[in-house]
Image (spheres, grey):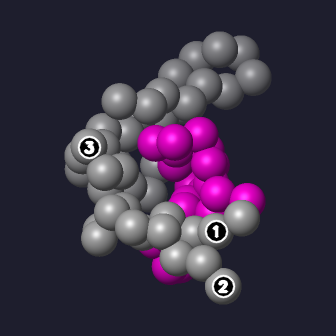
Amino acid sequence: MVTGTNSNGAIAWRERYTPFGITLDNESANDDQAGYTGYIEASNTGLVYMQARYYDPVIGRFYSD
C-alpha cells in the first residue's frame, strides 16, 4: 500500500497494488504522483516512467527505445 499526505501531514490518498504494480483500487486518487515504485505513472498511458525507460505493470516488462 502507498499513502500520500498533504502539507499538513494528513492522509490525502491511499492505493493498493499487485506484486507487479497494477493499481487495485482508488486509481484516480494518486493523480500522477509517485506510486508503487516511487516513480510517476502516466494516467493517460498506464506506463510508469523510470528515467531511462517505461515500465508496463500489466505485462510486467520494460519498454526501451
Q: Quadrant of the N terminus?
A: top left
Identify the residue shown where x is 57% and y is 69%: 54
Report, in whole angstroms, how far the alpha carbon at label 2 lies from the one at label 1: 8 Å
Residue 45: image location, x then y, percent: 50, 79
- Residues under numbered marks 2 and 1 in contact, where contact means CB atoms less than 8 Å apart: yes
Q: Earlier in the sequence, mark 2 or mark 1?
A: 1
What is the secondary structure assignment of the residue under circle 3?
loop
Report, in whole angstroms, how far the alpha carbon at label 2 lies from the one at label 3: 25 Å
Looking at numbered disc 1 in the image, what kind of residue is underneath it? Answer: Arg
> As rendered, which of 50 and 34 lies closer to the eye?
50
Residue 28: image location, x then y, percent: 44, 57
Label at residue 65: 2
Question: Of circles 1 and 3, which is in front?
Answer: 1
- Vertical placement of 34 versus 52: above or below? above
| Residue stretch rendered in magenta on the structure | 30-51
Left or right: residue 65 compared with residue 17: right
Identify the residue shown where x is 56% and y is 30%: 4
Q: Which residue is mark 1?
A: 53
Q: Give yes or no for residue 29 being in the magenta stretch.
A: no
Residue 12: image location, x then y, percent: 54, 31
Left or right: residue 18 compared with residue 5: left
Report, in whole angstroms, how far the alpha carbon at label 1 lies from the one at label 3: 20 Å
Can residue 30 be seen in this snapshot? yes
What is the secondary structure assignment of the residue under circle 2?
loop
Q: Which residue is mark 3?
A: 19
